[in-house]
Image: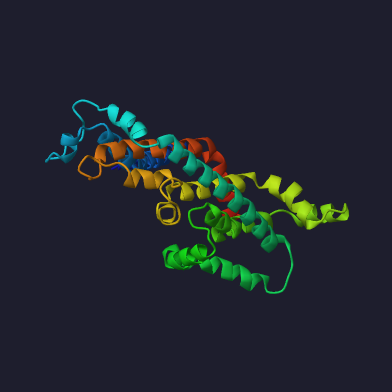
Amino acid sequence: MTVTRTPATTPATSTPPAAPSRSSRRRRNAAGTYLLLMTLAVLFAGPFAWLVLAALKTKAEWVSIPTKILPETPQWGNFVQAFTEINFPAYLGNSLFLSFMFATIVTFSSAAVGFGFARLRGRGKRPLFVLVLATMMLPQILTLIPTYVLFARMGLVNTYWPWVMWALGASPFFVFLFRQFFAAIPAELEEAAIIDGCGYGRIFLQIFLPLSRPVLLTSFLLSFTWTWGDYIAPALFLDPDQTTLSVAIAAFYLDPHGNPDATVQAAAAAMYVVPVLVIFLFGQRYFIRGVVSSGVKG
């Protein structure tokens, strides 16, 4: 009796699903990153959008309950009233002059101090640098009253000299930025200049300073923004004729009853933000490059 064997059937092997390609993962990561950035952009732009909407409302819409988000009829006349009710161009000129002056002086002085800490040799340089950085932990509001008493005794109140002296004293944060950037420049460049007969002043002005354009612009933008948005120091040190636009917006827009005119203030504040936005939009590439180069090198 012959036994016939049936061939064993091998179970069908299921093929594993193909792993997602690297390009598809990269596209998904990019989409998630852009979604996150768009969400953050909306959150950061929200206050400015609310400010513009408030500037376009009537006074009745501003105080209405519940709050109306969109105005029924945009009140563009609030911007005209904000520009004409006070001497807007004069206060704008005061803010521009003070901000440009302070930003220019503090950028140059901070670059000089940062160059000294990065390239010059001397005893006690490291503890002195740590002491300079430690001053960043001291809130400026604590030194405001002693500073005012000092400048009052020197006869510098109601002048722009306090900002000049603050700028000449340099900024610890900008000193750190310049020190990190200058420390990353190869020493051979400095040695070649010394062999050619250059002193450290000429090396700083003609070699190191032109190389630090991203950090220079970063320092200028940040210091300009700080001075432009400062309210306490101009309100304390300057009289109403010489004060800045931030103080004028907060104090000089009043209704016939002496109360703040909120919609006109909002229109003035919206115009007040525009110069800083324009400057940052034109300089953002160098701003980001300066922060990155100062933060990861050295």
Q: Is residue 3 above or below residue 175?
A: above
Extreme residue toward the left, this view: 65
Q: Residue at x 53, y 58 (%)?
A: 156
Q: Residue at x 64, y 44 (%)?
A: 213
Q: Where does the image place residue 101, in percent across and percent down from the top left?
A: 57, 47
Left/right placement of residue 209 relative to residue 260 reads right
Q: Where does the image place residue 153, in percent across and percent down from the top left?
A: 51, 66
Q: Return the residue nearer the eye: 298 or 254.
A: 254
Q: Is residue 297 above or below residue 70?
A: below
Quarter holding residue 33: top left
Extreme residue toward the right, this view: 196
Quadrant, the N terminus = top left
Q: Residue at x 26, y 42 (%)?
A: 254
Q: Where does the image place residue 119, in percent across and percent down from the top left?
A: 72, 61
Q: Return the residue nearer the eye: 167 or 17.
A: 167
Left/right placement of residue 72 relative to residue 80 reads left
Q: Where does the image place residue 92, in percent across and percent down from the top left?
A: 45, 39
Q: Which color scheme is applied?
A: rainbow
Left/right placement of residue 154 relative to residue 181 reads left
Left/right placement of residue 203 relative to residue 247 reads right
User: Would residue 186 be seen by someone viewing this image from the given angle?
Assistant: yes
Count the labels in the image.
0
Quarter holding residue 115: bottom right
User: Would residue 139 be seen by someone viewing this image from the given angle?
Assistant: no
Quadrant, the C terminus = bottom right
